[in-house]
Image: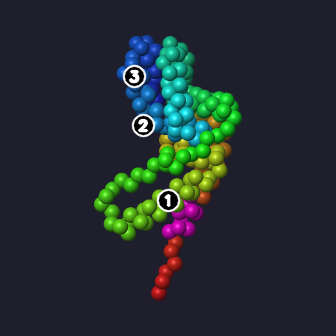
């Protein structure tokens, strides 16, 4: 995760020197989190890629004005949200998530079959619990847990209070814990 001072240094290098290496580093670091964020609005990987690409094209085109942006990370998320919403308004419909876009990744081949089944069930329960969260709750959960954003940053991005974020995260964690816990409780046979 980038420290704020590193982001500011990249911002400075892009502005003063048209530093393409700094721009590329910024792009590589933020591309995937912004892609997931855009996808949470537009529900299409292809459209999300276009949105994020447009955000970064705009950053390069306005590079002389980058010093005016106090928090570039927040700016990137807000720009992504705004372009996503602009796309949705233009289309007047939401695209459905394709089953082909779902990624399942099992890391270690060293598990025994029983562990694989238990882990697969646990992962499936977790993913089902996260996907069943209300939209705002799910978005806040993913921004905190997957993108590593701070409450204050999310409050600025979504234009809501920090207290709302705290409340929504508590709801999300409670629902996920209940969902996972109920799947772990198996009847004991005698």
Ranked by sequence position, the earlier of labels 1 and 3 is: 3
Determine which residue is flagged by label 2.
1
Q: Quick check: 127 left or right of 25?
A: right
Q: Residue at x 61, y 41 (%)?
A: 95
Marks 3, 2: nearer the viewer: 3
Q: Residues within 10 Å of mark 1 (few under 14, many from 20)?
A: some
Q: Residue at x 55, y 30 (%)?
A: 51
50 and 77: which one is in front? 50
Q: Quick check: 171 left or right of 26?
A: right
Q: Is residue 139 at all visible to an observer of this figure?
A: no
Marks 1, 3: nearer the viewer: 1
Answer whether residue 178 is magenta in the image: yes
In the rendered structure, find residue 124 and report the number of the disc placed on it.
Answer: 1
> Whole-Å distance between the Cαs marked 3 and 2?
16 Å
Q: Residue at x 46, y 23 (%)?
A: 8
> Whole-Å distance between the Cαs marked 2 and 1?
27 Å
Residue 48 x/y as whole percent: 54, 35
Q: Residue at x 47, y 87 (%)?
A: 190
- Relative vertical location of residue 185 with respect to residue 73 in this rendering, above or below: below
Ranked by sequence position, the earlier of labels 2 and 1 is: 2
- Relative vertical location of residue 7 with respect to residue 67 in this rendering, above or below: below
Are the residues flagged by discs 1 and 3 in contact, CB closer than 8 Å? Answer: no
Determine which residue is flagged by label 3.
22
Are the residues flagged by discs 2 and 1 in contact, CB closer than 8 Å? Answer: no
């Amino acid at each position: 995760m980038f420290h704020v001072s590193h982001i500011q240094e990249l911002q400075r290098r892009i502005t003063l020197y048209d530093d393409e290496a700094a721009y590329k580093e910024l792009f590589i670091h933020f591309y995937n989190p912004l892609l997931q964020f855009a996808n949470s609005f537009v529900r299409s990987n292809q459209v999300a890629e276009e949105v994020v690409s447009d955000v970064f094209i705009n950053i390069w085109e306005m590079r002389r004005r980058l010093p005016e942006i106090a928090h570039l990370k927040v700016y990137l998320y807000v720009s992504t949200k705004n372009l996503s919403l602009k796309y949705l308004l233009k289309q007047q419909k939401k695209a459905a998530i394709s089953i082909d876009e779902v990624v399942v990744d099992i890391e270690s081949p060293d598990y025994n079959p029983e562990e694989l089944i238990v882990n697969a069930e646990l992962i499936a329960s977790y993913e089902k619990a996260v996907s069943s969260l209300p939209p705002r709750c799910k978005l806040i959960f993913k921004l905190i847990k997957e993108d590593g954003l701070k409450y204050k940053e999310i409050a600025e991005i979504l234009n809501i209070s920090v207290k709302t974020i705290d409340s929504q995260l508590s709801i999300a964690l409670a629902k996920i814990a209940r969902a996972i816990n109920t799947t772990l409780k198996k009847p004991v046979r005698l």
